[in-house]
Image: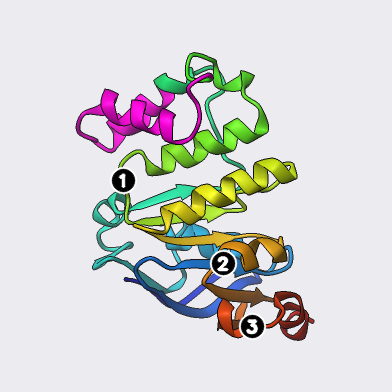
Amino acid sequence: MIKVKNISKKYGQIQAIENISFDLGDGEIVGLLGPNGAGKSTTMKIVTGVLSPDSGSVNVLGFDISQNPIKAKQRLGYLSEDNPLPSEMYVREYLEYVAGVYKTPNIKDKVSSCIEQFGLKNEYKKKIQALSKGNRQKLGLAQSLIHNPDFLVLDEPTSALDPGQQEEIQEIIKNLAKSKTVLLSTHLLHEIRNIASRILIINNGQLVADEKTENINSVTDLYHSVVK
């Protein structure tokens, strides 16, 4: 289980998030919604250990991410919103590099499996700079999963993709939740309805809603009722 307890973060005098708490259970896909500047990315970065909170704690499957960052990060995979990839590296070369960082056993077999899983068989000999936006996102997902983490954090995973590419990535995410816990942020309300089992809404740096998707008649109505 993932436990986020009372995390807060300021940038100078700006309170980005304040006293946010939630738990994530095994096999959940939890969608994080909020307007631009609401605190979604700050929350994601703290959950993954990229940023340290000013107060509060994050526990990833028994490991406090501030006190045991290596142990915690070995259990999670992260796709950031801007998906920074080294443009001059080849697809296979990059995946092997990431697998090596995580000391993944049987690297070549694992990379071959990821290439197959994410439909990159026709792309793995290309440099990353030659990939389409959709294939860059698939590569970003592949690198986040190369070490077989139990917890996956995805920040705007379908941003800037066309509808066909969005649907393809959504199906991949739904399949991943059969064996992993997934936290994803998005600004697409229909996407949350399609793939998330639970919805968290952040507004002005505070958690204003935590609801199971099955209990919500309209994600849009809920969103507009709490984001004002």
User: Is residue 160 among what the camera can see?
Assistant: no
Q: Position of residue 173 (x, y in %)?
A: 50, 52
Q: Is residue 82 magenta?
A: no
Is label 3 in a helix, a strand or a loop? loop
The range drawn in magenta is: 94-122
Q: Is residue 164 left or right of residue 78?
A: right
- Work out whether mark 3 precedes mark 2 in sequence or the reverse, and give the earlier one: 2
Q: Amino acid at mark 1?
A: Asn
Question: Mark 2: few, some, or many residues within 10 Å (few <14, many ≥20)?
Answer: many
Colour pattern = rainbow
Residue at 76% in and 85% down: 225
Residue at 65% in and 60% down: 186
Residue indicated by mark 3: 216
Q: Nearer the viewer, mark 1 or mark 3?
A: 3
Q: Is residue 120 magenta?
A: yes
Is there a contact, CB below 8 Å, between mark 2 and mark 1? no
Which mark identifies residue 31?
2
Q: Position of residue 129 (x, y in %)?
A: 61, 21
Q: Taking 123 as reference, is 15 above or below it?
A: below
User: Is residue 123 among what the camera can see?
Assistant: yes
Residue indicated by mark 1: 148
| Quarter of the figure with the C terminus | bottom right
- Measure the C-alpha gap from mark 3 to mark 2: 13 Å
Is there a contact, CB below 8 Å, between mark 3 and mark 2? no
Q: Position of residue 133 (x, y in %)?
A: 66, 33
Q: Amino acid at mark 2?
A: Gly
| Quarter of the figure with the N terminus | bottom left
